[in-house]
């Protein structure tokens, strides 16, 4: 839906708010677009600004914008970005690359590049124009949530076991980063986008700098009811608060367990570097109907995805410590 506040909203911003099942969206004289389901909300701003917060606790009982640690602001001048929130206890909204939230979910699934190629620059919306320019230059990435939703809703027959194995071998999950290497650690397992082949895979998790791609040509139909994944590749770095050079972080004793029947996961790993010392990253969270992973606590976040057949996984993570912040990306197999 699209919401445009009029004179009443301008005169009483403290009493005007749009609620979705999981988010409260306060406005500051705004024209904005929202796409929501029972467990997720995405929002882009055309003019003005919004404040998105988790619809829980005191926020659920109040009017107007909610503030605090579980809120985030998005304004029209933050081009190429949108806010997302995924339902989970303790979750908070976060900024991610923008997609066209007005795209019709009932249309046939298509790759983003094909969809953009069918339009001339004059017919692209503001968000799509940013996306097209970013893909053309291969310097930034968009998390194409609309394509993920479309793919998950298409009632396609599940792949045979032979087809699933072929898909895994030909299109493994991969982390790709921007061509200029902005904010990409030297030890990163990600590949440069313009020298690697996405080959029909879609961006499913990440940020402007490093993004996880997977084959989204089939619905999310994991094999089995539970899975124990083994770490196949990983890289992490420790950015120190004192401004000292970032250090490579060693990862060991890693595990990832997924329960497809309950749509939950839990993961653990040990982290170590000279400045960091010994740390543990442990998280549990939810698996969406499209196979997306999410977990958000006060001092750490996790974002990622599982392959459509449930045989691969990948996630990125951040953990804030007393002396700095650890950030890393991982790939897993069964």
Image (tube, rainbow, N blue to C red):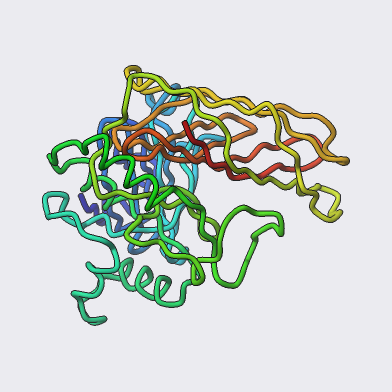
Residue 270 at x, y percent in the picture: 71, 29
Rendering quarter of residue 48: bottom left
Q: Is residue 304 left or right of residue 147?
A: right
For image coordinates 44% across by 21% down, the residue present is: 57
For image coordinates 22% across by 53% down, the residue present is: 2
User: Taking 110 as reference, is 14 above or below it?
Assistant: above
Residue 310 at x, y percent in the picture: 36, 33
User: Taking 147 as reference, is 131 above or below it?
Assistant: below
Q: Is residue 10 left or right of residue 243?
A: left
Q: Is residue 231 left or right of residue 264?
A: right
Q: Is residue 139 or residue 31 the one in the foreground?
A: 139
For image coordinates 81% across by 29% down, the residue present is: 278
Rendering quarter of residue 109: bottom left
Residue 49 at x, y percent in the picture: 41, 56
For image coordinates 49% across by 41% down, the residue present is: 314
Residue 116 at x, y percent in the picture: 25, 71
């Amino acid at each position: 839906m699209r919401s445009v506040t009029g004179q009443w909203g301008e005169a009483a911003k403290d009493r005007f708010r749009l609620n979705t099942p999981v988010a409260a969206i306060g406005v500051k004289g705004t024209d904005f677009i929202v796409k929501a389901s029972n467990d997720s909300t995405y929002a882009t701003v055309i003019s003005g600004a919004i404040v998105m917060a988790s619809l829980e606790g005191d926020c659920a009982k109040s009017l107007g914008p909610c503030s605090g640690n579980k809120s985030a602001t998005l304004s029209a001048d933050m081009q190429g970005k949108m806010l997302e929130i995924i339902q989970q206890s303790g979750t908070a909204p976060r900024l991610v690359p923008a997609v066209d939230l007005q795209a019709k979910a009932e249309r046939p699934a298509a790759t983003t590049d094909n969809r953009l190629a069918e339009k001339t620059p004059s017919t692209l919306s503001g968000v799509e124009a940013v996306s097209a320019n970013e893909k053309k230059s291969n310097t930034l990435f968009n998390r194409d949530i609309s394509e993920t939703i479309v793919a998950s809703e298409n009632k396609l027959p599940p792949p045979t076991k032979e087809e699933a194995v072929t898909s895994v071998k030909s299109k493994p999950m991969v982390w790709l980063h921007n061509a200029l290497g902005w904010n990409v650690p030297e030890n990163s397992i990600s590949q440069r986008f313009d020298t690697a082949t996405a080959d029909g895979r879609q961006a499913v998790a990440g940020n402007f700098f490093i993004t996880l791609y997977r084959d989204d040509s089939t619905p999310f139909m994991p094999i089995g009811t539970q899975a124990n994944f083994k770490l196949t590749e990983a890289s992490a770095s420790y950015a120190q608060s004192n401004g000292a050079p970032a250090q490579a972080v060693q990862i060991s004793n890693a595990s990832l367990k997924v329960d497809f029947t309950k749509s939950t996961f839990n993961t653990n790993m040990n982290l170590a570097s000279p400045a960091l010392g010994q740390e543990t990253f442990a998280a549990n969270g939810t698996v969406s109907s499209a196979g997306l992973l999410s977990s958000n606590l006060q001092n750490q976040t996790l974002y990622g995805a599982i392959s459509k057949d449930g045989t691969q996984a990948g996630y990125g993570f951040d953990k804030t410590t007393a002396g700095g912040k650890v950030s890393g990306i991982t790939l897993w197999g069964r």
